[in-house]
């Protein structure tokens, strides 16, 4: 019923080539299943990674090369605003290798920058430290949309930014 050109080759005649090859499939699972030792989440200022805490102890306890990470992180964040807090997720593998991923700064950082204030209000809801416009909210949500990975709509992200601003004592105006 199914033409032979569509059927995958049988295992005993596997030559190791082609998309239906058992050997090719085995190679994919070996690459995909490196044993993960730990996932490390850190908040590091842009361009300021150094072997001192919090980076050194977090990577050192898993036996990772601290200076390699610091140099790579500082090189990648050299063009960003200095001292912007950058969330980093480091995946440490059992063979002492690692991969790392940067995310955009937290919403509170962007809201405080847009409002031009150093810190949030001491009594949110009672005291207003600053204001941001809906245009600022939209731009912040567009930046955070990259981190959301398509799981949240832009409208949901805007609502989250507005809620964060409110909790920091910053009023959103039209």
Image (spheres, rainbow, N blue to C red):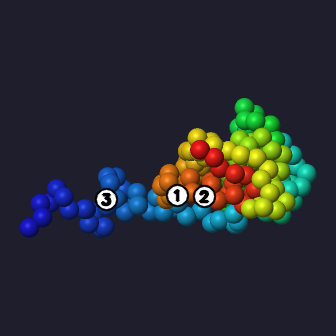
Q: CA distance from mark 1 to mark 2?
A: 6 Å
Residue, disc 2: 160
Residue that appears at 85% across and 60% down: 122
Residue closest to the eye, 9 or 150: 150
Residue located 82% across and 62% down the image: 123
Task: Check disc 1 and report the residue beneath it.
Answer: 156
In this rendering, would 153 be left or right of 143? left
| Residue beneath the point at 73% across and 52% down | 170
Q: Is residue 170 above or below residue 12?
A: above
Query: Mark 3 or mark 2: which is in front?
Result: 2
Q: Are marks 1 and 2 in contact (CB under 8 Å)?
A: yes
Q: Nearer the viewer's eye, disc 1 or disc 3?
A: 1
Measure the C-alpha gap from mark 1 to mark 3: 42 Å
Q: Within 10 Å of the Cα at label 2, are there few (<14), some (14-19), or many (20+) other Cα atoms? A: some
The residue beneath circle 3 is: 20
Position in image of residue 127 (x %, y %) = 80, 57
Rendered location of residue 98, percent (x, y): 69, 54
| Label located before the other in sequence (1 or 3) | 3
In this view, the residue in front, 150 or 140, is: 140
Tell me where residue 143 sits by quadrant: top right
């Amino acid at each position: 019923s199914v033409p032979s050109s569509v059927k995958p080759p049988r295992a005993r005649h596997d030559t190791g080539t082609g998309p239906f090859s058992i050997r090719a499939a085995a190679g994919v699972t070996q690459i995909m299943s490196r044993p993960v030792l730990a996932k490390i989440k850190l908040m590091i200022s842009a361009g300021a990674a150094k072997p001192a805490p919090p980076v050194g102890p977090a990577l050192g306890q898993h036996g990772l090369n601290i200076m390699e990470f610091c140099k790579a992180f500082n090189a990648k964040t050299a063009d960003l605003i200095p001292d912007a807090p950058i969330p980093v997720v480091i995946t440490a593998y059992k063979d002492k290798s690692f991969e790392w991923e940067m995310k955009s700064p937290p919403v509170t950082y962007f809201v405080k920058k847009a409002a031009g204030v150093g810190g949030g209000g001491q009594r949110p809801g009672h005291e207003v430290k600053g204001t941001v416009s809906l245009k600022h909210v939209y731009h912040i949500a567009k930046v955070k949309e990259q981190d959301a990975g398509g799981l949240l709509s832009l409208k949901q992200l805007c609502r989250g930014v507005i809620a964060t601003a409110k909790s920091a004592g910053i009023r959103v105006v039209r």
